[in-house]
Image (cartoon, rainbow, N blue to C red):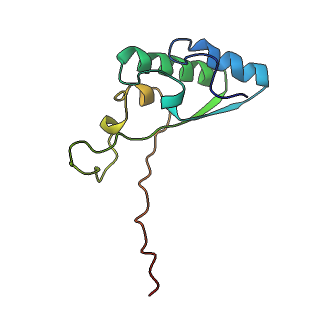
Amino acid sequence: MAWPLPFDLAGEPAALLAMAKHYGADVVVLDSLKDVAADLSREETGQGLNRAFQGCVADEVDVLALHHQRKAQNGAGKPNRLPMSTVPGGSRPVAGRCSCCGAKPATRLSSSPT
């Protein structure tokens, strides 16, 4: 399928299932949420994404949505844990998901030989 999506996913939640059916997909992978919906910080955006995901799941189409935690603000450093509060848009985009997981980047190794 061509990228970017021809619709704003939060504004047209039914379009994700329609697209999956059009292509005969039983799994949809979105990389990343910031690229499929405008203004993730708005409550309405998170609700629309949740409706899109739930519509797919109800029709037996799995959704894998990749998302990134917010970057550190004002030198506060990155959190050691990955709370849902670090997700842009708060917990709404992930609230209806069956599973959520987080991954922290590995520590960068020195390039100098030992």
Q: Quadrant of residue 44?
A: top left
Q: Position of residue 92 (x, y in %)?
A: 39, 24
Position above or below: 5 against 102: above
Quadrant containing the N terminus is top right
Looking at the image, residue 5 sits to the left or right of residue 84; the answer is right
Q: Is residue 97 visible?
A: no
User: Which residue is the extreme one toward the front?
Assistant: 112
Residue 62 placement, left or right of 36? right
Furthest residue toward bottom: 114
- Image position of 47 (left or right of 1): left
Q: Is residue 76 above or below residue 84?
A: below
Q: Quadrant of the C terminus?
A: bottom left
Q: Position of residue 5 (x, y in %)?
A: 63, 23
Q: Relative to 81, is 59 on the left or the right?
A: right
For this rendering, which residue is in front, 98 or 6?
6
How many dots with numbers?
Answer: 0
Residue at the spot 40% in from the left edge and 65% down from the top edge: 107
- Residue under the point 53% across and 35% down: 32
Which residue lies at the image location 43% right of the left edge and 27% below the top edge? Answer: 93
Nearer the observer, 68 or 6:
6
- At 28% from the left and 45% from the top, the residue drawn is 72
Q: Where 99 falls versus 23 (above or below)?
A: below
Report x, y in % for residue 88: 37, 32
- Residue 109 visible (yes or no): yes
Residue 90, by quadrant, is: top left
Residue 29 screen position, x and y as percent: 62, 35
